[in-house]
């Protein structure tokens, strides 16, 4: 498959990467919060050794390796796309249903499974809070983020991959795990919906 050659700049996380790798107690307050307070950076990357290992396993098996190991939506989302096939667009509905199957098997901190925890989570604002579909879309957009101090998609990017949010022929959302970038610097997610959430999605 032909390698993607998208162009991306402003790798802000590179400026604090080494600080974020340190144990939490040893990290300096180098990130400015929305309130203007300086705080320690969060660690969004995986270790270089693990990157090498996951790429080696992928080369050997031909299967993209999920870098998200913690039970939750990121792990389920990426795994669903791996299960259905990388570098192909899949309808939001079937991805959501596969995520549910996977998350029902994941334990959660509150003695429920991960899907029950996610589904039952109350919105911060009862007037503007999104429904279940909207929150999943919102998470997809969040894990597309590769710039700034909070690059939730950094682990995928380290493996030369990203999430793409596409508009299907019927106007409904589709999701793709693109894994064919030539290098780390070429990774650039696509969002054809340009929205933070979507409520009118078929159940």
Image: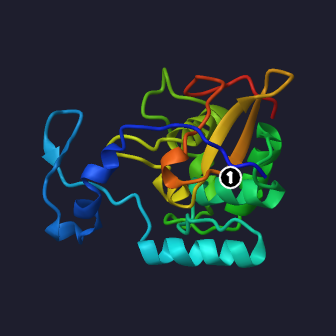
Residue drawn 48% across and 48% down? 185
Secondary element under disc 1, as helix, strand or loop, is loop
Left or right of 157 on screen, residue 115: right
Q: Residue at x 73, y 79 (%)?
A: 60
Report the front residue among 110 and 95: 95
Q: Is residue 163 above or below residue 115?
A: above
Q: Quadrant of residue 124?
A: top left
Up-down: is 203 above or below 84? above
Residue located beneath label 1 in the image: 180
Instruction: Give residue 163's position: percent from left, percent from top.
Output: 62, 45
Relative to 1, say whether 51 is above or below. below
Judge from the rendering whether residue 106 lies leftward or rightward of residue 51; answer left or right: right
Image spot of residue 73 (x, y percent): 59, 53
Q: Is residue 126 above or below residue 133?
A: above
Picture coordinates of residue 56, whole percent (x, y): 63, 77
Percent coordinates x, y for residue 96 in the rendering: 74, 46
Task: Check the image and name the residue furthest to the right.
Answer: 170
């Amino acid at each position: 498959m032909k390698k993607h050659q998208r162009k991306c700049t402003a790798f802000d996380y590179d400026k604090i990467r080494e600080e974020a790798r340190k144990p939490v107690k040893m990290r300096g307050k180098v990130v400015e919060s929305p309130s203007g307070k300086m705080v320690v950076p969060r660690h969004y990357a995986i270790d270089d050794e693990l990157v090498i290992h996951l790429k080696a396993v992928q080369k050997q098996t031909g299967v993209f390796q999920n870098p998200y190991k913690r039970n939750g939506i990121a792990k389920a989302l990426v795994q669903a796309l791996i299960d259905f096939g990388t570098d192909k667009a899949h309808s939001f509905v079937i991805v959501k249903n596969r995520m549910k199957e996977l998350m029902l098997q994941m334990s959660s901190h509150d003695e429920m499974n991960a899907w029950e925890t996610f589904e039952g989570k109350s919105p911060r604002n009862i007037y503007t809070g999104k429904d279940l579909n909207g929150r999943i879309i919102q998470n997809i957009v969040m894990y597309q983020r590769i710039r700034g101090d909070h690059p939730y998609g950094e682990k995928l990017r380290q493996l030369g991959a990203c999430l793409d949010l596409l508009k299907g022929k019927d106007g409904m959302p589709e999701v793709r795990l693109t894994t064919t970038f030539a290098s780390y610097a070429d990774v650039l997610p696509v969002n054809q919906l340009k929205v933070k959430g979507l409520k009118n999605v078929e159940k």
